Amino acid sequence: MPTLNLKTDPLKILVTGAAGFIGFHLIKALQAFDHQIVGIDNLNDYYDPQLKLERLKVLGLELGSEGQALNTQARLACGNLSFIKLDLADRAGIAQLFEQEKFDLVVNLGAQAGVRYSIQNPHAYVDSNLVGFVNILEGCRQTQVKHLVYASSSSVYGMNSKQPFSTEDRVDYPISLYAATKKSNELMAHTYSHLYGLPTTGLRFFTVYGPYGRPDMAYFSFTQKILKGESIDVFNNGIMQRDFTYIDDIIEGVMRVMERIPAAQESELTQAHAPYKIYNIGNNQPVTLRRFITAIETACGQKAQENLLPMQPGDVPITYADVDDLIVDTGFKPSTSIEEGIGKFMEWYKRYYV
């Protein structure tokens, strides 16, 4: 399998979703090396835009409260990082960006996230996750990008009963539009890998959490409400299980995968020849919602008031990642415990909000 070395090879790298949770942390890690990094984000208001601006500030980009008013394709720079306000669905803008920059590596982390939000706002997912992803694929194809790494999701496994979830499992029955768009990304990537020889690697992330995380995630809203003495909604009596994965583990996994360009190969099921790979990145240790809440209570130093509710549409009872391929190919296995990870999140949360 061909490789790159992020520590020694100066590369031009595009990171989409640069002001997002994972994109921010990835760029922060890449800034330590001698790369030219371009980050793009549309700075939408799906959740508090101020948090996105704060992430960019940490990266050295001072947008103040004017971030939302930036003109499309306005460029800011700090050191080896350039930031451009740009929407993935902007076909002409994305094509122009690729033609001008000639990227070596592309990491597509920009997407409309959230399972429940997809039920009320389906078109946002079509625009960003489908139209936007095709624009990225076309940009990579037209400019001979060496490797496209893109975010998929554990949600593609739906309500699969076999545990743990393996990348060899069938994922043909998504139960949310968000999951369907992520599965579609994998299908489109395979097509481009087969037709055009574009090396692509999809990463099925499992419930990512940590400092500067998304406010719409349960751990974030639980923390806010517990500290305020408000009740929290606990679905399915807290017996659901999630393979919570700390952000530092996610970033280490992403960076190791970025270096491994998949070789063209045929699977056992098909003769389609494609430089294509899928990995799970999860902690490989599912945690009950009950233990998760207890970890937050401990970090907060106070008990939660609970409002017990049935499982929500689009939710699944368990996520559990088989990461054997990741370990074999990269030598890395996520390992941060929920108690350690929540503790680190709480340290950041109290600095930022309290």
Image (tube, grey):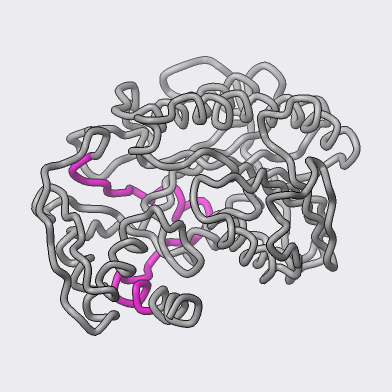
Asked if the stretch drawn in magenta spans residue 196, the answer is: no
Asked if the stretch drawn in magenta spans residue 332, the answer is: yes
Front residue of this view, candidates 74 and 139: 74
Dividing the picture into quarters, in which one does residue 42 lie?
A: top right
**Does 347 sit above or below residue 100?**
below
Q: Where does the image place residue 295, in percent across and percent down from the top left?
A: 24, 73
Q: Where does the image place residue 150, in percent across and percent down from the top left?
A: 58, 40
Front residue of this view, candidates 323 and 100: 100
Where are the magenta residues, as a range? 316-343
Does residue 284 appear to the left or right of 122 in the view shown?
left
Q: How many marks?
A: 0
Q: Where does the image place residue 135, in percent across and percent down from the top left?
A: 69, 26
Does residue 66 appear to the left or right of 300 in the view shown?
right
Front residue of this view, candidates 135 and 269: 135
Q: Which residue sits at x=76%, y=29%?
A: 139
Instruction: Please identify the quadrant where the C terminus is shown.
Output: bottom left
Dividing the picture into quarters, in which one does residue 284 lie?
A: bottom left
Q: Where does the image place residue 28, in percent across and percent down from the top left?
A: 66, 66
Q: Which residue sits at x=16%, y=55%?
A: 234
Q: Which residue sits at x=38%, y=37%?
A: 117
Instruction: Please identify the quadrant where the N terminus is shown.
Output: top right
Does residue 221 appear to the left or right of 290 in the view shown?
right
**Does 175 sit above or below residue 230?**
above
